Amino acid sequence: MPAKEASPKKKYIDDRWFRESEGGVFLVGTKCGDCGRISFPAKEVCPDCFSGELETEPLSMRGKLHTYTRSDMGVPGIEAPYVFGFIDLPEKIKLFGMITDCDPWDEVLKIGMDMEIYITAVRKDQAGGEIVGYKFKPLRGDR
């Protein structure tokens, strides 16, 4: 069954970043039909060759931890402290996001370790409703 646009019932950070299938929700970018570059978020024009021949491309939901840090200062809708960092995807994309399920973070997290992306509520809107995005966590078995 082909993927469909993200459900309007869910409030996503950006509907263009997500698709739903029978297997769940996943991230999508664009792939250039001329040079093969995959981009996230989706682009209108390839940033490498400037081609407009782009198609929606599902992204891997696993990657490697590139770097991370902990913040003790909260931002609206996100309780501190929290850990965030960059994950390298096989598509040569670096994703930035919050890292969870890693206590104690300074012992669990290791540069280069396998991570997985999961789709979940990332914060609340002004009315208290959940806004859905993505987060990272260590891949089971890496601990």
Image (spheres, rainbow, N blue to C red):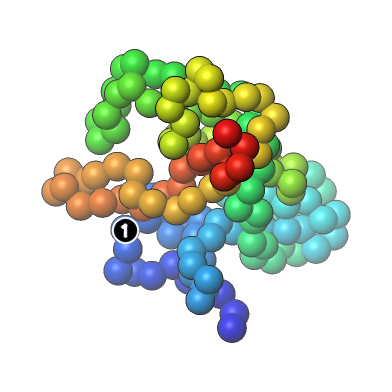
> In which image quadrant can residue 82 be found?
top left
Of residues 53 and 66, the one nearer the viewer is 66
The correct choice, above or below, for 79 with respect to 51 in the image is: above
| Image location of residue 111, percent across then percent down | 66, 25
Quadrant containing the C terminus in the rendered view = top right
Apparent side of residue 57 relative to residue 49 in the rendered image (left or right): left
* Residue furthest to the bottom: 1
* Residue furthest to the right: 35
Of residues 58 and 54, the one nearer the viewer is 58
The kind of secondary structure element at disc 1 is loop
Apparent side of residue 136 relative to residue 110 in the rendered image (left or right): left
Of residues 28 and 51, the one nearer the viewer is 28
Q: In this figure, which residue is indicated by the disc labeled 1? A: 11
The residue drawn where x is 59% and y is 83% is 1
Amino acid type assigned to the residue bearing label 1 in the image: Lys
How packed mark 1 is, by other alpha carbons closer than 10 Å (few <14, some 14-19, many 20 or more), is some
> In which image quadrant can residue 7 be found?
bottom left
The residue drawn where x is 55% and y is 56% is 27
The correct choice, above or below, for 25 with respect to 120 in the image is: below
The correct choice, above or below, for 133 with respect to 76 in the image is: below
Apparent side of residue 112 relative to residue 71 in the rendered image (left or right): right
Of residues 105 and 131, the one nearer the viewer is 105
The residue drawn where x is 20% and y is 52% is 129
Is any part of residue 52 visible from this angle? no
Across the whole image, how many numbered discs are drawn on residues?
1
| Image location of residue 116, percent across then percent down | 57, 46
| Image location of residue 121, percent across then percent down | 33, 49
Is any part of residue 59 visible from this angle? yes
The residue drawn where x is 66% and y is 43% is 63
Apparent side of residue 110 relative to residue 101 in the rendered image (left or right): right
| Image location of residue 102, percent across then percent down | 47, 31
